[in-house]
Amino acid sequence: MTRNLMVLFAAGGSAALMAGAFAFQALGYPPCAMCIWQRWPHVAAILIGVLAWKIRGVLLPALGALAAAITGSIGFFHMGVERDWWEGPTSCTGNGGLDGLGGADLLAVTGPKVIMCDQVSWAFLSLSMPTWNGIFSFVLVGFWIAAIRLNGVSTKAGSSRNV
């Protein structure tokens, strides 16, 4: 195993998760606000991976690991919101108030459908999309850490260099 292979797996995993998110969106599962939040660290990890492919050192893989850990943490936080373990942001959960709005105001509202963060829109094996994102993202953290550990290892057997 080489450092660049681990970088490829890590950044490629983020790209695959992003592709999956957009595929689900195309299939009619629009993202909620917290789902969008989970996408940004994946974008960062992909960009970091492109840079880390050419630039040696441990800084970029460490930043990639941090990005993957952030999106995984948001995913697990989102899972807790869906399972009513804790409250989520009032901007995208059923906890927001309707003070100051009358029935006519509510009926007059038009525009895109608001996707609630505390509702599971899709699940596989009883695990929601944010949960799967959390699981896979922490696997990607492992690939980033492997890239860090392999940073000074040369591809030639028995030789290594420190960068």
Image (tube, rainbow, N blue to C red):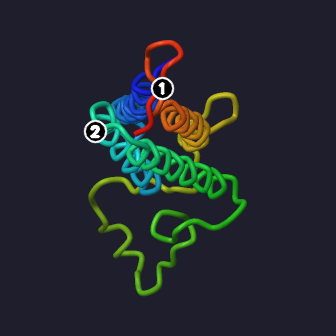
Residue drawn at x 69%, y 53% as measured from the top left: 83
Q: x, y (%) of residue 52?
A: 33, 37
What element does badge 1 sit on? loop
Question: How many marks on residues?
Answer: 2
Q: x, y (%) of residue 27?
A: 38, 29
Residue receiving disc 1: 160
Q: x, y (%) of residue 95?
A: 57, 71
Question: Image check: 143 left or right of 17?
Answer: right
How far apart marks 1 and 2 lie (CA) works out to: 22 Å
The residue mark sitting in front, 1 or 2, is 1
Q: Does residue 38 sit above or below 6 in this rendering?
A: below
Q: Earlier in the sequence, mark 1 or mark 2?
A: 2
Callout 2 crowding tier (Cα within 10 Å): few <14, some 14–19, many ≥20: some
Residue drawn at x 42%, y 30% as measured from the top left: 7
The amino acid pointed to by label 1 is Ser
| Quadrant that contains the C terminus | top left
Residue receiving disc 2: 51
Image quadrant of residue 60?
A: top left
Residue drawn at x 55%, y 38% as measured from the top left: 145
Residue sticking out furthest to the top: 157
Report the front residue among 76 and 102.
76
Residue drawn at x 53%, y 35% as measured from the top left: 140
The amino acid pointed to by label 2 is Leu
Report the front residue among 126 and 134.
134
What element does badge 2 sit on? helix
Image quadrant of residue 161?
A: top left
Report the front residue among 96 and 133.
133
Callout 1 crowding tier (Cα within 10 Å): few <14, some 14–19, many ≥20: few
Residue sticking out furthest to the bottom: 100
Q: x, y (%) of residue 37?
A: 42, 55
Q: Does residue 98 sit above or below 40 in this rendering?
A: below
Question: Image check: 140 left or right of 58?
Answer: right
